[in-house]
Image (cartoon, rainbow, N blue to C red):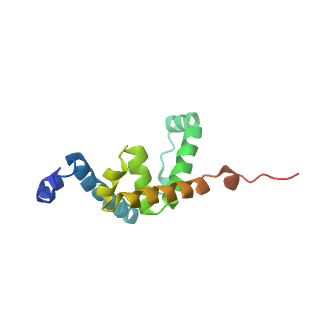
Amino acid sequence: MFVVWEKAATYDPKFKPSTWIFGIAFNKARQAVRDAKRDEEESLDEIDEDSSWLGKLDANIGQLEMDEWLDYALAKLSPEHRAVIELTYYEGLHYSEIATIMGCPENTVKTRMYHARKNLALLLNPADKFPQTTH
């Protein structure tokens, strides 16, 4: 909220305040992700081998695999394509709001969405991940 206060003079009243604030948050989050990638690398050796954690893992293994598969696919997208997917499906924003946040025309958002969906379809194709064997 401090950044919103600092940038109050840059607010354009033709846009909804929530869209403007979300744009600030989006840019801050993107920077935090960049910083975290540089600073953080966890190894499997550091994971606590608590038996209650393992029980929960066993119960949710299918969901974890699906989440990892989707995270893998999203990570393979360009930052612009991933942002459009996340802002549309996770945040429920309209293309016009996404265009404002990303600082591009609405048609560019639509084009990025088209290509992002196409790339996700290729990345998430189960036939590519699990090739059939012939006997």
Residue pushed farthest left? Answer: 9
The x and y percentages for residue 135 are 88, 51
> Is 16 situated left or right of 95 in this image?
left
User: Toward the viewer: 79 or 114?
Assistant: 114
Taking the spot 46% from the left edge, 63% from the top edge, the residue there is: 78
Instruction: Please count the marks in the image.
Output: 0
Res 44 seen here: no
User: Toward the viewer: 108 or 25?
Assistant: 108
User: Toward the viewer: 108 or 65?
Assistant: 108
Residue 17 vs 43, above or below: the answer is above
Taking the spot 60% from the left edge, 52% from the top edge, the residue there is: 124
> Is 96 situated left or right of 113 in this image?
left
User: Toward the viewer: 72 or 80?
Assistant: 80
The x and y percentages for residue 100 are 29, 56
The x and y percentages for residue 38 are 38, 66
Residue pushed farthest front? Answer: 107
Residue 89 vs 84, above or below: the answer is above
> Is 50 situated left or right of 127 in this image?
left
Res 97 seen here: yes
Residue pushed farthest bottom? Answer: 38
The x and y percentages for residue 55 are 55, 34
